[in-house]
Amino acid sequence: MNPGDADRFVEAAAAYVHIPFCSAVCPYCDFAVVAGQDHVAPRYVGAVCAEVQAADPWRPLEAIFFGGGTPSNVDPALLGRIVEALVARHGITNGAELSLEANPEDFSIERASQLRQIGFNRVSFGAQSFDDTVLASLGRRHLAADIEDSVLAARKAGFDNVSVDLIYGTPGETDQSWGQSLRRAVTVAPDHISCYALTVERGTPLGRAVSAGAEAPDSDVQANRYETADRILTSNGFDRYEVSNWSKPGWECRYNLTVWAQGEFEAYGNGAHGFREGRRYRNVRRIDAYIQRVESGASPRAGHDTVTGWEAELDRLFVGLRRTVGVAEGPGTETFLASAEGKTLVDAGVLGVGDGRIRVTRPLLTDAVHRSLLALDGPIVKVDSDA
Ligand code: SF4
């Protein structure tokens, strides 16, 4: 992807919709999700539609992303109500991307066809691994064969944009099983593949197990697995366009491109985070609190940060340097490259400078670059909170 194509998403308008319902909560999951509460879905969807209708009118949306949770678990007719509300409130551009996350254990061709009829044209499967032993230790409820069946069902129903998410570095996973997962992922012929390191979040069952002595993911092993992923995916026609995301050329996720270009995206639902008109905001995390607030006519916002001036420039670098194309030079890159941390990163070959841009050339060290950015001296950051 060329820099101009990536940077144009700063002008895009997108929307994220959080659907928190899962059939069970995976032991490593730290998202705002619930299990066993599917009966609440109609009421929750009513609240999301009300939040959409109460939003300030905006320009047409170029990308809509239903994440979760497991949006594919919810009755498609309910998801369709939210899509209708978004289109009625903001409009939608011709050929907009309508994406949803799905789990392989329950993705049938009938479900896929219903979702296509509503207008979804991209599906992202939480595949995680093609090794059934690893899937079991992640607490997943599908087998590798279900992933293959799901991708096939999506294709048959007319989804021409399919993504597969993988997790690497699960204790018990071997170099060989990770390599096989990647090769099987390539064989099901998705257009897009994301690979994330397993992380141990405090407060999750995995976090408690590791605190009690269970084996934790090894960061050196994970670094090797990342490099294996990059090698196998790149040699099979996938380009890495962001730290953890690879796609066939032209199949990059437009919702994510908007986020990383510092474009604007509205967010709806419990725990959802958005960015519009210089504010990064977040909704209350608990589903019951979210529904109660919206139904009583109150704002579901838990807080917001004003992002202007130096803060906005730092934010542009922070999100933009995740991309392979990096960011165009500006006041922030000048300050960064003049700093001791910036010079060290350039000398170490972690940051590349050229063609009026700076890029992270060693993606495994993106977190270190982010830490250096946060250490930069700049004007005092103004943070507002309304909760
Ligand atoms: S299916 Fe996804 S969102 Fe749901 S609990 Fe598992 S990891 Fe979390």
Image (cartoon, rainbow, N blue to C red):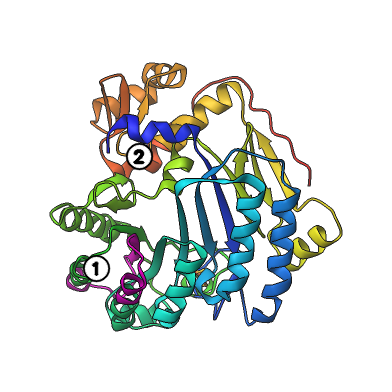
Q: Nearer the viewer, residue 278 or 149?
A: 149
Image quarter of the N terminus: top left
Residue 234 is situated, as x and y percent measured from the top left of the image, at 17, 52
Q: Tell me if 92 is positioned left or right of 386 in this view.
A: left
Cα gap from disc 1 to disc 2, whole angstroms: 23 Å
Q: Is residue 357 visible?
A: yes
Quadrant of the rendered image containing residue 233:
bottom left
Q: Nearer the viewer, residue 373 or 211?
A: 373
Q: Residue 320 has which mark?
A: none
Q: Residue 323 has which mark?
A: 2
Of helix, strand and loop, which one carries label 1?
helix
What is the span of residues highlighted in magenta in the rendered image? 152-177
Residue ID for mark 1? 185
Q: Residue at x 27, y 75 (%)?
A: 130
Of the image marks 1 and 2, the number of the one nearer the N terminus: 1
Q: Is residue 140 visible?
A: no
Q: Amino acid at mark 2?
A: Arg
Q: Nearer the viewer, residue 108 or 328?
A: 108
Q: Is residue 39 above or below residue 120?
A: below
Q: Amino acid at mark 1?
A: Ala
